[in-house]
Amino acid sequence: MTEYEDIEVVLADYVATVEMQRPPHNFFDHSLIGQIANAFDELDENPDCRVIVLASQGKSFCAGANFGGGSKDSSASRDFTEEGFRNTTGILYREAARLFGNKKPIVGAIQGAAIGGGLGLSLVPDFRVAAHEARFGANFVKLGIHQGFGLSYTLPRLVGQQQATLMLYSGRRLNAEQALAIGLVDMVTDQDNLRDEAQGLAKEIAENAPLAVMSVRATMRQGMAAAVAEATELELAEQQWLRGTADAEEGIRAVAQRRPGNFNGN
């Protein structure tokens, strides 16, 4: 297997574990998403892999982009700046759309927060096994921007239009049990058992005829990659103009400072 800078890929018993390694919160940029997409492509061509488990080190599954408190220091994601939305976030979303085009089933092991773009990443897998400590939120309106990472398509497809709209309008955060109730996750378990449960589901799928599984998956997810690519084009356009507003600057500061935003509609 190829060695990657920020992920590790381990393959055993027809199940590959792709682990993000940017603890504690696994903030992403287009490099990390591209590495995951490249690993998925490689595993698609490996007959010894039948199912993938997507997991991560640290406290959070993925807390989205690192907003750096709205500052321009090196801790802030260059993709989230106003210039970044014009020049690099489109690259990130093209990489994100690639994640939905792989051939083999994916089980997500969600140990902690999946927030913003991290929520979008958590919806790449076919199934999600969550620890009780997991949290899910589409907090974009609290940041003063539009949702991204294809959530306009993937979230309502999974939980229904009404529940998705409620999450996106309110920016509320759901715990694992609430996520289970609306179909956002498929199983909730103790933190100590999370990887075993995710691996167990993956192995249950891997026991079946691999060509048949891929064929069924292709039917069930038909058109998904194209739909995500189309959704991200609209999302990016909305994010680009909103990122230049005073409300977005306030939202970034407010979220970084863990306080409600003082928005003025400009």
Image (spheres, helix red, strand yellow):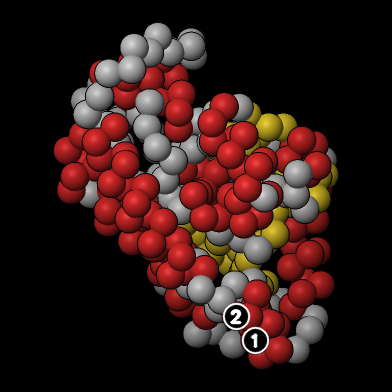
Q: Judge whether residue 6 can be spotted in this image.
A: no
Q: Is residue 217 above or below residue 69?
A: below
Q: Judge whether residue 159 can be spotted in this image.
A: yes
Judging by the rendered image, the residue that carries numbered circle 2 is 218
Could you say whether the residue bearing mark 1 is in a helix, strand or loop? Answer: helix
Image mark count: 2
- Can you give x and y, in whole percent of width and height, for residue 170 in the image? 57, 27
Q: Is residue 265 above or below residue 54?
A: above
Residue at figure coordinates x 80%, y 37% from the top left: 177
Report the side of 71 relative to 49 (left or right).
left
- Can you give x and y, in whole percent of width and height, for residue 79 in the image? 27, 42
- Can you give x and y, in whole percent of width and height, for residue 206 in the image? 74, 78
Residue at figure coordinates x 54%, y 31% from the top left: 169
Judging by the rendered image, the residue that carries numbered circle 1 is 215
Report the side of 109 relative to 151 (left or right).
right
Please rate how many residues cluster around mark 1, counting C-alpha atoms within 10 Å: few if below 14, some from 14 to 19, many from 20: few
Contact between labelled residues 1 and 2, with CB atoms less than 8 Å apart: yes
Q: Mark 2 belongs to which amino acid?
A: Ala
Q: Is residue 69 above or below residue 200?
A: above
Q: Mark 1 belongs to which amino acid?
A: Ser
**Among the 4 quarters of the image, the one containing residue 202:** bottom right
Report the side of 199 relative to 16 (left or right).
right
Residue at figure coordinates x 32%, y 41% from the top left: 238
Separation of residues labelled 2 and 1 (CA atoms)? 5 Å
- Can you give x and y, in whole percent of width and height, for residue 132 in the image? 77, 36
Please rate how many residues cluster around mark 2, counting C-alpha atoms within 10 Å: few if below 14, some from 14 to 19, many from 20: some
Q: Is residue 78 above or below residue 207?
A: above
